């Protein structure tokens, strides 16, 4: 009970950070002016996924697979082991020797396929020149990152046990903030006008201002 109350308080305290991160993110997006060349392939990937999702096909099977893989990866990071692993288009499940909020929430801010494509490209590039495939990589990053964000939003509309067990306010705030930072980091690599460092500092500054204003209001 004490832990739940603590998580609720932390979740409430994180709300100004979500607002600050959103504002800083919007500010950085407004700086992007160049959509030609390589950045255009990223945007094409985003648009293609949205068209597919809204009109043709929702990749539930692949999202659930990536979701459970992320759970397993988080378990290994925490020093645990996976006892069983299952998934289908209707949902999945994983049994592990360790459980904590990091393992529970990890899939909601870890874009499995996006980082997989990036890792494969990096590893292959160590042995041969594949710069000609960069446009394809950016397309896949845009496509897979949009898959992660859209499907995560849809998943969170359902009463996910991972989220409710960890604490709803705490989970949603944490997932939102980490996704903003992760997407910002990726965009900072693709778009030269987008600065992750500036976004991070702006988020801290704006959140600090909100905390201070609230403190002054109380005291």
Image (spheres, grey):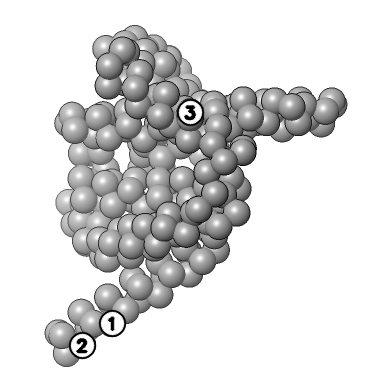
- Taking the spot 83% from the left edge, 28% from the top edge, the residue there is 129
Which residue is label 1 attached to? 212
- As rendered, which of 85 and 201 lies closer to the eye? 201
Residue 68 falls left or right of residue 119: left
Looking at the rendered structure, the secondary structure element under dot 3 is helix
Relative height, residue 93 to residue 37 (above, below): above
The extreme left residue here reads: 218
Q: CA distance from mark 1 to mark 2?
A: 6 Å
Which residue is label 3 attached to? 45
Relative height, residue 162 to residue 33 (above, below): above
- Residue 120 point in image, percent of width and height: 67, 26
Q: CA distance from mark 2 to mark 3?
A: 46 Å
- Taking the spot 27% from the left edge, 12% from the top edge, the residue there is 90
- Residue 214 point in image, percent of width and height: 20, 79
Q: Are marks 1 and 2 in contact (CB under 8 Å)?
A: yes
Which residue is label 2 attached to? 216
- As rendered, which of 143 and 32 lies closer to the eye? 32
């Amino acid at each position: 009970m004490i832990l739940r109350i603590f998580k609720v308080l932390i979740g409430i305290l994180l709300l100004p950070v979500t607002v600050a991160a959103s504002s800083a993110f919007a500010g950085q997006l407004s700086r992007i002016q160049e959509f030609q060349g390589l950045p255009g392939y990223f945007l094409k990937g985003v648009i293609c996924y949205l068209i597919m999702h809204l009109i043709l096909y929702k990749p539930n099977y692949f999202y659930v697979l990536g979701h459970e893989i992320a759970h397993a990866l988080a378990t290994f990071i925490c020093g645990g082991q996976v006892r069983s692993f299952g998934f289908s288009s209707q949902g999945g499940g994983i049994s592990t020797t360790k459980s904590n909020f990091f393992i529970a929430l990890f899939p909601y801010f870890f874009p499995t396929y996006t980082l997989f494509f990036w890792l494969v490209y990096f590893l292959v590039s160590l042995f041969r020149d594949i710069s000609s495939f960069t446009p394809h990589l950016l397309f896949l990053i845009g496509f897979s990152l949009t898959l992660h964000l859209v499907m995560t939003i849809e998943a969170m509309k359902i009463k996910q046990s991972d989220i409710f067990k960890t604490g709803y306010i705490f989970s949603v705030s944490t997932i939102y903030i980490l996704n903003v930072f992760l997407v910002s980091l990726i965009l900072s690599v693709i778009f030269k006008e987008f600065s992750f460092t500036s976004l991070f500092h702006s988020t801290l500054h704006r959140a600090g201002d909100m905390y201070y204003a609230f403190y002054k209001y109380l005291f």
